Image (tube, rainbow, N blue to C red):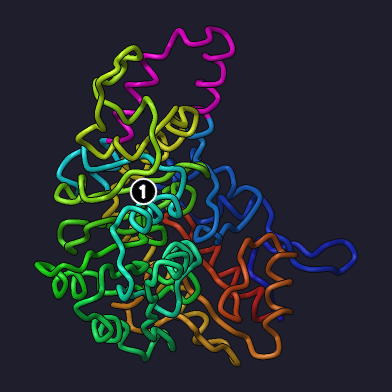
């Protein structure tokens, strides 16, 4: 079989490898190529299609963390006021990203699980209450609700599989009754990549006693997100996937009308008013989402995530989403042309997000290993191989992935 230019066989005739010169071939017509080349050195070593798990950092993010480390190493806490400014900037960027009314609706949390757990532990549950999720949730959006079983709370799972057939939204709404306290779903299913119609669900729940909670980790940063337009009461997401940031720092959005509706279980100086008065004996929780941040912030990660968001917002989230869709469409079209491929992800463009999962019959394990051996970073999910390109991936990289699959 004739191989595309740029492939290199190993001396022993072993698997095809991705080589650095492939990253610079035939990309002069892409107006973002200079930025991609400057910000993503990962492309010199890998075809990186694992953004639904952990993303590589942009170069500016590495520099931001290095600058912070250099500063604290040389000067200790001298730059503390600047750290506080960076925290405020990050909160503003996150508020803009979810279209919150303002930064006062956004809390900085360790991860998605922590954000969702604020809701699960913050409500006043009664035996017989229920929570509706889907049958395709990541444990972060399942376990906090399952942990309420000892309080007599039922977890109901709506059918969302097969991803291209089930009317997931209708199945979710069908399970809602007068005892449903929360509907909590992922904006995009982590295994299949199915994008849910959040506005359809939120519109039905608006004005009812049922809160709408969204795990947005597989869409925030990849596509425009509007918490208010989808009538979300709570939104949680991590920084280390499509936001291109570090692990250990995420965002929790709380609609203003719910800020005082969640019972607090953690307390500390950072969530209190008057803020910064360490001698105060009379204090109360902050009237903003800072009330969910009890102690010392993750200052190094604040610097890193703020830098990553600056890149996404420089490119523009609309443009980021358009480029991801272009890459997903390109990959799906190529997979559909290969024999023996079963797409697990939806073929309906309206249901697609940034994830493409496919099975290759009895060759699935072989294909996965061939991709890994060739320098393509993917993961096994939903019984297949999951591909998750970001805006900076080159279409030529996807063509090479398809050739590796064909040759496996």
Above or below — where is 83 with respect to 227? above
Question: Residue 267 at x, y = what percent?
Answer: 38, 34
Above or below — where is 302 with respect to 143? above
Task: Indicate whether residue 73 is drawn in magenta.
Answer: yes
Q: Residues within 10 Å of mark 1 (few under 14, many from 20)?
A: few
Give the side of residue 84 with respect to residue 332, left or right: left
Question: Residue 358 at x, y = what percent?
Answer: 55, 81
Q: Quadrant of residue 373?
A: bottom right
Question: Residue 231 at x, y = what percent?
Answer: 17, 62
Q: Main secondary structure of the magenta part?
A: helix
Viewer-side residue, 15 vs 276: 276
**Boundaries of the magenta span:** 63-91
Q: Which residue is mark 1?
A: 31
Image quadrant where one finds the C terminus: bottom right
Question: Residue 137 at x, y = what percent?
Answer: 45, 72
Task: Indicate whether residue 379 is drawn in magenta.
Answer: no
Above or below — where is 335 with respect to 295? below
Give the side of residue 283 with respect to residue 244, left or right: left
Q: Residue at x 46, y 48 (%)?
A: 111
- Residue at the outermost left position: 207
Viewer-side residue, 325 vs 235: 235
Viewer-side residue, 56 vs 77: 77
Q: Residue at x 61, y 67 (%)?
A: 379
């Amino acid at each position: 079989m004739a191989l595309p230019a740029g492939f290199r066989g190993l001396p022993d005739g072993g698997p095809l490898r991705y080589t650095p010169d492939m990253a610079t071939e035939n990309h002069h017509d892409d107006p973002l190529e200079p930025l991609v080349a400057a910000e993503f050195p990962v492309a010199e070593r890998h075809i990186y299609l694992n953004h639904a798990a952990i993303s590589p950092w942009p170069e500016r993010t590495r520099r931001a963390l290095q600058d912070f480390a250099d500063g604290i190493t040389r000067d200790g806490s001298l730059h503390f006021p600047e750290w506080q400014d960076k925290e405020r900037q990050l909160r503003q960027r996150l508020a803009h990203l979810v279209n919150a009314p303002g930064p006062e609706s956004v809390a900085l949390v360790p991860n998605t699980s922590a954000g969702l757990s604020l809701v699960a532990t913050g409500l006043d549950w009664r035996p017989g209450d229920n929570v509706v999720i889907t049958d395709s949730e990541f444990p972060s959006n399942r376990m906090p609700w399952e942990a309420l079983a000892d309080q007599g709370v039922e977890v109901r799972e709506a059918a969302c599989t097969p991803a291209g057939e089930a009317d997931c939204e209708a199945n979710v709404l069908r399970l809602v009754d007068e005892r449903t306290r929360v509907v909590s779903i992922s904006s995009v299913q982590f295994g299949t990549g199915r994008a849910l119609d959040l506005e359809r669900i939120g519109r039905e729940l608006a004005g009812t006693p049922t809160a709408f909670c969204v795990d947005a980790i597989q869409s925030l940063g990849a596509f425009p997100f509007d918490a208010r337009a989808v009538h979300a009461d709570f939104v949680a997401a991590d920084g280390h996937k499509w936001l291109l940031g570090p692990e250990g720092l995420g965002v929790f959005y709380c609609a203003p009308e719910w800020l005082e509706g969640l019972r607090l279980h953690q307390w500390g100086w950072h969530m209190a008013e008057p803020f910064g008065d360490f001698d105060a004996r009379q204090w109360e929780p902050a009237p903003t989402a800072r009330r969910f941040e009890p102690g010392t912030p993750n200052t190094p990660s604040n610097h890193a995530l703020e830098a990553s968001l600056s890149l996404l917002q420089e490119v523009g989230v609309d443009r980021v989403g358009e480029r991801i869709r272009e890459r997903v469409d390109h990959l799906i079209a190529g997979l559909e042309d290969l024999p023996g491929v079963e797409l697990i992800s939806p073929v309906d463009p309206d249901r697609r997000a940034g994830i493409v999962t496919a099975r290759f019959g009895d060759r699935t394990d072989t294909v996965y290993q061939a991709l890994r051996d060739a320098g393509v970073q993917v993961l096994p999910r939903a019984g297949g191989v999951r591909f998750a390109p970001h805006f900076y991936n080159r279409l030529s990289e996807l063509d090479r992935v398809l050739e590796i699959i064909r040759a496996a």
